[in-house]
Every structure is written in C-alpha cells, then in structure tokens.
Image (cartoon, helix red, strand yellow):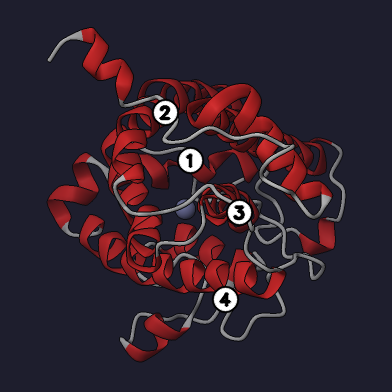
C-alpha cells in the first residue's frame, strides 16, 4: 500500500459549506464550519485535543480540592491525599497513554469509523435523540466494562496488567486513565462497542468519548459531591461505588451503574469513610 492510498483514508468523504448545507442553529453552523475549514480528520483531531484538555481541566480541579483540602466532608477516603510522587508517577503514565496509545489508536480507527455508516451531515441529532444515544452508550459501555474488568481481575491479568490501575487504592481525578497500556486498549474497545451497535451521528460519537472521559475523572475524583451531573440516574453508583472498588479490589466491577454487580453478586455497599 503506497502513501497516497494511506492518505486517501484520511480525506473527507464529502465537501461541507456553511452557505449550502443550511445550518439552522449556532451548533450546526459551528459543526459545518469546522468540517469546511479543517475536514473530517481535522474535526477528529479537534475532538481528541478537547478530550485531553477537558480531562486535564477536570483532573486539575480535583487536584486543587486535594491540595487545599477543600470539601473534606465529601472526601471518600478522608485521610488519603496524593503525594507529589503519586502525582508525578500518574502524569508520566498519562502522557504515555495519551500520546503513544490513545492518539495512534484513534488515528488507526479513523478510517474504520467511516465504514460504520455514521454521518457528519446535517441535521444534527435533536437534544432528546442525543441524550438517548448517550444514555445507551453509558449503559452499553458499563456492560462491556463490567465483563472486561472482571476478566482483568483473574490472577494472571491482574498481576501483569490491571494491578497498575490499582496502584492507587485512594484514586484522584488524574488517575482515571492511569493504567497499563494494554488495559487502555481493551477498555477503549468497551467505550467503542456501544457506538458500533447503535451507530449514532458523528456529533454524538465524539461527544460520547468526551463524556466517557469526564465520567471516569468524576468516578476517580475521590469526592462524593451531589451536584455531579450523573448522580440523578437510577442505579448510578458513581464515585463512591468505584472508589470502593479501588479500596476493596474484589467488588463493584461496573463503570458507574450498580445493577450488574447487584444481579451478579459482586456489589458491596460503600463503607467509604476511614
Ligand atoms: Zn479505577
Ligand atoms: Zn479493578
């Protein structure tokens, strides 16, 4: 395969024009303007950077919570604050995962995502359709994550791969993607799997990856704060649920929802205060 053929995989599938495509609101206008200006691959890179930037902002906000001991009553493992060495180790791992694993994985997946029949074209999905698709992604990812996570807790895979993610028994925001690179790849499949099934609009597809990352930052934050946007959902275990997994290891394998753990007998009530 020559370079020209490889480059053709990254070309836009159609042309976009704000005058012709008739956007009906500011979001649709911005969507088409970015596609017209940067192309489909440029849009992908923009979303990747947004995902990484929002992850960094979320992690940094919780870092400030720890540094200045804000909201101590909401801290799940009250005496366990990360040290500077904890932070350095975590950030070194994140840099490798984001640059060596997640970005190349996204670039390689880019041509394949086109084959799924997803569209960039207007109209963008309605608010309700968007929320429904995101909800289905949250539930679907939780299902695939549960089984992969249980698999990673079998002796060989735990010792050689998943143990890295459990280095921090009291997680903090930046630890959401702190993991062995092999685990990052496998859990990336869990994030991608519901998209493969429901085939949403590309706008939802990219938004889902950002929401997934922010949800992971929240569930690793170490703080149980009621204003978290997902807390109203039924069976949403959230931060205390996953924090307890890091503390106890052999329970609460779901990403965020508790129902699979409850049905399959792996749920443990949080006893989160030290
Ligand atoms: Zn975790
Ligand atoms: Zn685990």
Q: Is residue 212 left or right of residue 126?
A: left
Report how far apart the C-alphas of labels 2 and 4 lie in the structure: 30 Å
Q: Identify the residue position indicated by label 3 in the image.
A: 211
What's the mark number on residue 97? Answer: 2
Query: Residue tagged by mark 1?
Result: 177
| Residue shown at the point (22%, 17%) measured from the top left | 5
Spatial CA span between label 3 and label 2 = 18 Å
- How far apart marks 1 and 3 lie (CA) works out to 14 Å
Q: Residue at x 36, y 72 (%)?
A: 143
Which residue is drawn at the image coordinates 36% and 35% (left, top)?
110
Residue 256 drawn above or below residue 31: below
The image position of residue 28, as x and y in percent, is 73, 49
Please state which of the two labelled residues, at mark 4 or mark 1, is closer to the viewer.
1
Give the SS element for disc 4. Answer: loop
Going from N to C along the chain, the mark reached first, 3 or 2, is 2
Badge 1 local density, few (<14 within 10 Å), some, or many (20+)? many
Q: Nearer the viewer, mark 3 or mark 4?
A: 3
């Amino acid at each position: 395969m020559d370079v020209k053929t490889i480059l053709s995989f990254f070309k836009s599938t159609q042309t976009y024009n704000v005058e012709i495509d008739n956007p009906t609101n500011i979001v649709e206008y911005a969507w088409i303007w970015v596609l017209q200006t940067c192309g489909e691959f440029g849009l992908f890179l923009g979303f990747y950077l947004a995902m990484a930037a929002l992850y960094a902002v979320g992690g940094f906000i919780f870092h400030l919570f720890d540094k200045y001991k804000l909201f101590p009553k909401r801290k799940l493992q009250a005496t366990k604050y990360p040290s500077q060495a904890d932070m350095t180790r975590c950030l070194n791992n994140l840099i490798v995962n984001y640059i060596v694993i997640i970005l190349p994985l996204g670039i390689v997946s880019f041509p394949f995502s086109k084959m799924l029949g997803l569209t960039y074209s207007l109209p963008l999905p309605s608010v309700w359709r968007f929320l429904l698709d995101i909800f289905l992604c949250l539930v679907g990812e939780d299902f695939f994550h549960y089984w992969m996570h249980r698999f990673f807790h079998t002796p060989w895979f735990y010792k050689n791969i998943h143990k890295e993610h459990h280095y921090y028994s009291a997680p903090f925001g930046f630890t959401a993607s702190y993991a062995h690179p092999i685990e990052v790849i496998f859990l990336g499949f869990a994030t991608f799997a519901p998209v493969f099934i429901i085939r949403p609009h590309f706008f939802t597809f990219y938004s889902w990856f950002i929401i997934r990352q922010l949800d992971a930052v929240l569930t690793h934050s170490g703080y149980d704060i009621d204003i978290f946007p997902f807390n109203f959902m039924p069976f949403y275990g959230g931060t205390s649920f996953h924090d307890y997994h890091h503390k106890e290891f052999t329970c609460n394998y779901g990403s965020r929802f508790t129902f699979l753990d409850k049905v399959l007998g792996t749920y443990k009530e949080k006893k989160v205060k030290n």
